[in-house]
Amino acid sequence: MSFIAAHRRNILNRKSIQYSQIKPGNILTFRYRNKEGIAGLEYVLALNVYPMRGGRKDKKLHALVLENMSIPIFNRIINRIYSEYGNDGAEYTFNKDDIESSLQIETFRVEGGEDGDKFYYRNIKRFDRYDLYRTYKLDALAGVKLITYDFSKFDMRKKLVISEQKALPKQEPISEKLQKEIKRTSKLDDKDAQLKTQRLIEKRNEKVLKQNIENDFKEGDLGKLIQDVSKLNPNIPQEQLESMIAQELESEGIDF
């Protein structure tokens, strides 16, 4: 049974790389022609490139094929890596402002080189019955691409998210003194806003009264004129206002 379709649904991105950039722990895809001359597209979890010395023709890629690996088995393999190395079992990135949705595992910690066999026997051999292990001649690989895989439903990613969230610095509580200062400043801001609003209303009313006074003056309505002028100048005594208005009207030749 092939599980490739399930894995393809989890592929977020593919990036072309050189064979020399392959590292243990990478998830890769490439074209490969086997001994029988049959070419196919492979999806693998890289374990090692060995031997360490020699040219491309001398080296082989040791890997686990995703085609025979169900998602639950993949999850178990990754859990083995986490059990041994904890958060150091993967290279990953995240945004501190949104760890849960942004954390992305890039590659896993898989011991390659001379220690490749030790890592295999500690963590991978128990999965031999699933027929996962393969070797590929490095000089026969074509179109090698590094895969960015969606691990959002895998246990290891969930543990990494929780760990990084706990590691965030805790926000210190606001002191009682600072709380009082915030409240005081807020009240001052409110009072300032009220004063500004009051001044705007006063300016608007003053403009209206002046317009009314002008109309009263033109119409010669002494009673209304005195009333409107009194509103505009509330501190001037009534008798003084009437005298001032009478003088103004008289100078304009208006009978009253």
Image: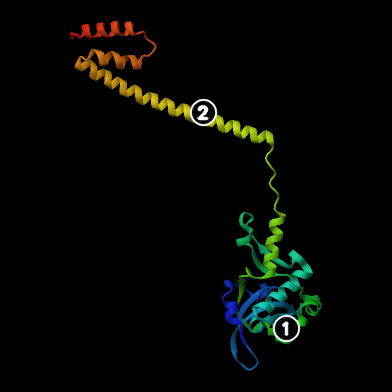
Label 1 Cα crowd, 10 Å radius (few <14 / some 14-19 / many 20+): few
Is 64 located above or below residue 192 in the figure?
A: below
- C-alpha distance separating marks 1 and 2: 82 Å
Q: In the drawing, does residue 79 fall left or right of residue 153?
A: right
**Which of these two is toward me, 69 or 42?**
69
Write down the quadrant of residue 254 in the picture: top left
Three-letter code, disc 2: Lys
Is 193 located above or below residue 13 in the figure?
A: above
Write down the quadrant of residue 174 in the picture: top right
The answer to whether the residue labelled 1 contacts the one labelled 2, judged by CB atoms less than 8 Å apart, is no
Which residue corresponds to mark 2? Answer: 191
Q: In the drawing, does residue 26 fall left or right of residue 86?
A: left
Q: Which quarter of the rendered picture does the N terminus lie within?
A: bottom right
Is 105 located above or below residue 137 in the figure?
A: above
**Which of these two is toward me, 247 or 237?**
237
Q: Position of residue 242 (x, y in %)?
A: 29, 8
Mark 1 against mark 2, which lies toward the viewer?
A: 2
Three-letter code, disc 1: Asp
Q: In the drawing, does residue 238 fall left or right of residue 157?
A: left
Q: Position of residue 154 (x, y in %)?
A: 66, 70
Residue at position x 71%, y 56% in the image: 166
Residue at position x 75%, y 73% in the image: 80
Which residue corresponds to mark 1? Answer: 58
Residue at position x 39%, y 11% in the image: 235
Residue at position x 64%, y 62% in the image: 103
